[in-house]
Image (tube, rainbow, N blue to C red):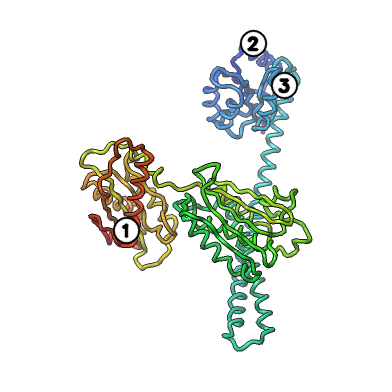
């Protein structure tokens, strides 16, 4: 089968340069190249988006595009097209940057020879083909590896659970009395089973992350509660090594993050600190506003362990990296914990880093965005309410009719989308999850509305949810209710931030009362939907 000619798009606004290039192409054998010429980037984008081009000869100084911007726009229009950029003699540095951004080659105007041009085109196409093949092979290898690790991890879980369960039964004396020596051996078995379970969990976590299957549920997270949970979870190993594990937070702190993942990061860091701290040492966990950025919260785990060599400090968060040192022979694991922690922190909008001094100890620090209810409410408070409008809190409840505790994430996500669709963005806002994970079946919205408006909004949300759930509706009980705050207006000379803080206090108090069944404001409810 005859090959079709290479379709070349020349994007060049200089008539003289374009004429020279057209003459070069005219000397090539018929049927090898098919040349089209445009002078503006907007026209080139339209042609590229139709998939009608194999190679682009792109001038980086056009009337409607300049520099790397032109390359990025071309790649956005057709990510698979072969790019060759053209620059002046003084722009070679820019051309090098273009290569790093995905161009296959560059040509310097005034130095393009008749023979060099077609050769450059063919070589660029071949390099692109090899790159695509290499990327495909690499992706296939990664996918095969991840599928293998995920399969092996799942297969190991079942027998491991059985080993742990029966070992616990024996250790607890439920299968008959055991001697002190037998108990000692069983405790060794259980410790190693727990260690293996931790490794398997890490493998599954990493494969989830790399496959893009990790879902975060961002909301208001109590940092104080997360720290308390993590410290209590790791208190056993600390007591075994007689390590002083302490926690300091001060005033209540809230982050805009995923509660489960915040606890996971803290647990990884505290557990790591205890592993590397000798018996009788100390591990301290702290949290507070970050001095560099008041919109972030800083959390730190500091230990009096062996420390990390300077040449390793920058690599401790790498995938499967472990510090190689005979003094750390007691280290157990796959080198995935810190890698997982870094990924989780980054996905939640924070940063993580480490500092250390050999023989003194290490400090692991990470940041998370601070949650501010006042900042969330401030945009709608700029809305000019009518005399009969006030702030209403509307809440929607979703639960299984049979009382099952765990709602599918897909249902919760659909419910949040429905709420956002039913509200006016200029005067209403859907609040993120506020509180512990068990409260996520309640959704809250704040709206400026008339006395009867809250009921209308609640009814509209319930109606939309019924349609959204479709056949699943019979499995769930829906409820909607609302209550109004006392009428709040800015005080004379009160700035918007202070007013927003005052409203936030009222909203937070009202939500607390709603959760604890103690809302004394006028309240209307529709249930059993």
Question: What residue would you read off at disc 1?
Answer: 514
User: Which label sits in the foreground, 2 or 3?
Assistant: 2
Q: Is residue 234 left or right of residue 321?
A: left
Kind of element beneath mark 2:
helix
Q: Residue at x 68, y 62 (%)?
A: 277
Q: Position of residue 525 (x, y in %)?
A: 25, 57
Q: How far apart in space, not on screen, are marks 2 and 1 (Cα)?
A: 75 Å
* Residue, disc 2: 16
Kindly give the residue lying farthest to the right in the view shown: 326
At x 67%, y 59%, the residue is 304
User: Pointer 2 and pointer 1: residues touching (CB < 8 Å)?
Assistant: no
Which of disc 3 and disc 2 is earlier in sequence?
Answer: 2
Q: In the rendered view, would you say 44 is above or below 446?
A: above
Side (left or right) of 17 relative to 233: right
Question: In the shown orientation, is residue 54 left or right of residue 359?
Answer: left
The mark closer to the camera, 1 or 3, is: 1
Q: Position of residue 99 (x, y in %)?
A: 68, 30
| Crowd rating for badge 3 (residues with CA inside 10 Å; few <14, some 14–19, many 20+) | some
Q: Find the distance from the CA under tag 1 to the CA under tag 3.
A: 73 Å
**x, y percentage for residue 36?**
59, 20
């Amino acid at each position: 089968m005859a090959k079709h000619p290479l379709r070349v798009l020349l994007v060049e606004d200089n008539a003289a340069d374009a004429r020279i290039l057209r003459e070069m192409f005219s000397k090539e054998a018929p049927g090898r190249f098919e040349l089209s010429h445009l002078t503006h980037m907007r026209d080139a984008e339209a042609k590229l988006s139709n998939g009608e081009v194999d190679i682009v000869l792109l001038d980086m100084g056009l009337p409607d595009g300049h520099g790397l911007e032109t390359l990025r726009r071309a790649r956005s229009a057709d990510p698979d097209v072969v790019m060759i950029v053209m620059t002046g003699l003084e722009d070679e540095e820019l051309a090098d940057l273009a290569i790093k951004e995905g161009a296959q080659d560059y040509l310097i105007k005034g130095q393009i020879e008749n023979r060099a041009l077609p050769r450059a085109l063919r070589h660029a196409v071949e390099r692109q083909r090899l790159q695509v093949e290499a990327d495909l092979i690499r992706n296939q290898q990664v996918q095969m590896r991840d599928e293998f690790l995920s399969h092996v991890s799942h297969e190991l879980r079942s027998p491991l659970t059985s080993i742990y369960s029966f070992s616990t039964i024996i250790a607890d004396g439920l299968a008959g009395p055991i001697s002190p020596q037998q108990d000692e051996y069983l405790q060794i078995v259980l410790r190693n089973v727990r260690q293996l379970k931790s490794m398997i969990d890490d493998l599954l976590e990493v494969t989830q992350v790399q496959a893009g299957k990790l879902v975060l549920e961002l909301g208001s997270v109590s940092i104080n509660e997360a720290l308390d949970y993590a410290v209590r979870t790791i208190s056993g190993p600390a007591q075994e090594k007689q390590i002083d594990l302490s926690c300091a937070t001060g005033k209540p702190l809230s982050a805009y993050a995923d509660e489960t993942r915040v606890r996971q990061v803290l647990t990884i860091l505290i557990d790591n600190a205890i592993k590397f701290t000798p018996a009788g040492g100390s591990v301290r966990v702290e949290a507070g506003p970050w001095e560099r950025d008041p919109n972030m919260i800083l959390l730190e785990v500091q230990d009096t362990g062996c420390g990390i060599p300077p040449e390793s400090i920058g690599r401790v968060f790498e995938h499967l990296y472990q510090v190689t040192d005979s003094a750390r022979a007691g280290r157990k694991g796959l080198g995935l914990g810190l890698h997982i922690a870094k990924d989780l922190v980054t996905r939640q909008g924070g940063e993580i880093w480490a500092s250390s001094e050999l023989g003194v100890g290490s400090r692991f620090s990470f940041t998370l965005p601070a949650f501010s209810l006042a900042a969330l409410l401030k945009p709608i408070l700029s809305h000019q309410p009518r005399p009969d409008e006030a702030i209403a809190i509307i809440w929607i409840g979703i639960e299984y009719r049979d009382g099952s505790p765990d709602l599918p994430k897909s249902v919760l996500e659909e419910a949040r989308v429905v709420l956002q669709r039913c509200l006016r963005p200029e005067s209403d806002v859907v609040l993120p999850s506020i509180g512990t994970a068990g409260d996520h079946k309640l959704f809250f919205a704040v709206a400026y509305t008339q006395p009867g408006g809250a009921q209308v909004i609640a009814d509209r949300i319930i109606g939309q949810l019924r349609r959204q759930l479709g056949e699943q509706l019979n499995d769930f009980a829906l409820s909607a209710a609302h209550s109004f705050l006392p009428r709040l207006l800015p005080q004379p000379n009160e700035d918007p931030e202070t007013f927003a803080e005052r409203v936030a206090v009222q909203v937070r108090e009202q939500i607390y009362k709603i959760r604890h069944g103690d809302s004394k404001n006028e309240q209307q409810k529709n249930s059993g939907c």
